[in-house]
Image (spheres, rainbow, N blue to C red):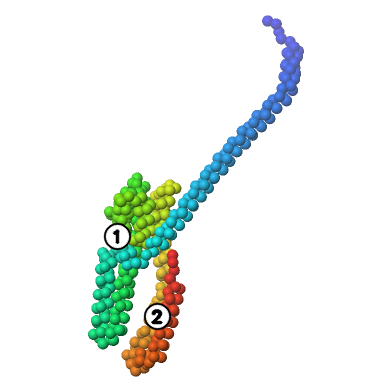
Amino acid sequence: MFGLDPMMLGVVALVAIAAGAVAYGVLFGRLEAEKKTATRLNRVKAAETDMGRVKAARDRVQEMSKRRKSVQDSLKELEKKQQEDSRKRADKSVKSRLAQSGLSLTVPQFYMISVGLALFLSLIMIVFGLPIYAALGAGFVAGAGLPRWVVGYVVKRRQNKFLEEFPNALDVMVRSIKSGLPLNDAMRLIASDGQEPVKGEFRRVIESQQVGLSIPEACARMAQTMPLSEINFFAIVIALQGQAGGNLSEAIGNLSKVLRERRKMRAKVSALSMEAKASAVIIGALPFIVATLVSITSPDYMAHLFTDPRGHLIMLGSGIWMSIGIFVMRNMINFDI
């Protein structure tokens, strides 16, 4: 073996280093250019990716805007249709009021009761010595007004009971839909196991579906026998879900919460206005109470109002002014929620 000369090894190493330096100097520009090119390509790809993401986000926003606009248009159309139907259903006829009251009375029976009441009161007043024309006039007013007032009172009481039970029925529908039942079966469950008058109203909805109406149309017809804004809300939710889709259980659950909040607000307003209502009742009843007491203690003092023509004018003017005052107080203490 030949020994390696250290000088030779140093020369070889220096030559290798010099060759490497020359190669690096020659290739450095190309490597730097390739690096910059790769960097630019990555930036372009990232920009294209970002542009794609931006475009996808823009497309999603546009799609959501179109969907929102479609829902808003559908909602406006449904509200307009509901308002038109409400105007058509705003029938104050005896037949409509009897249907809303839930009483098993027909229109001829109602008129027979009114006529019988008018004749009975007229005979009673004639027996007590009132003139015939006064007795007939009082009997006519009582026969025409008292049965209608009773029906109106029954309708109002039935509507209040419906509003108390309706949110619970909606909660039952939400749980039924979440458990997998279709909307029709959820309504059928309320129609069979619910509380009156909600049970009867949903039974009418099921019967309407059996004769060929769709669910939104059947729900809209519910307002004929229960003309409430809450029913219009429910019909709009059902119709909107049928047209635009969406989570029906969530929509009905939100409606149930809204109805409960409306009921709480109505009760709060009623409690706050109770003092004003009591004051209005006292102010309205005070003239009649004073007149009755004065008539009992001093009949001659009050007799001039009934025997003198000027007394008749005074009572007429007082009645008109009292009616105006009662009307103003009623509008001041009644709030539409």
Q: Position of residue 222 (x, y in %)?
A: 35, 57
**Where residue 57 appears, x then y in whole percent?**
55, 42
**Circle 2: is it few (<14), some (14-19), or many (20+) Cα within 10 Å?**
some
How crowded pointer 1 is (Cα within 10 Å; few <14, some 14-19, many 20+) is rated as some
Look at the picture and state if 199 lies above or below 150.
above
Viewer can see residue 285: yes
**Point 36% across, 84% down: residue:** 288
Q: Which residue is mark 1?
A: 196
- Say if 301 sits above or below 144 in the image: below
Hey, what amino acid is under mark 2?
Gly
Q: Is residue 276 visible?
A: no
Instruction: Indicate whether 102 appears above or below 68.
Output: below
Residue 5 placement: quadrant: top right
Q: Nearer the viewer, residue 268 or 114?
A: 114
Which quadrant holds residue 127? bottom left
Q: Amino acid at mark 1?
A: Glu
Residue in the picture at 58% in, 41% down? 54
Give the x, y percent position of residue 80. 45, 57
CA–CA distance between discs 1 and 2?
36 Å
Q: Which secondary structure, mark 2? A: helix
Question: Viewer-proximal residue, 224 or 112?
Answer: 112
Please report the residue visible at 40 percent of the width from the left and 61 percent of the height from the top. 88
Toward which corner of the image does residue 168 lie, by quadrant?
Answer: bottom left
| Residues marked 1 and 2 touching at CB (< 8 Å) | no
Please report whichever mark, 1 or 2, sits nearer to the chain's N-terminal start.
1
Q: Nearer the viewer, residue 228 or 173?
A: 228
Q: Secondary structure at mark 1?
A: loop
Q: Which mark is residue 284?
A: 2
Q: How many marks?
A: 2
Residue under the image location 63 percent in, 32 percent down: 42
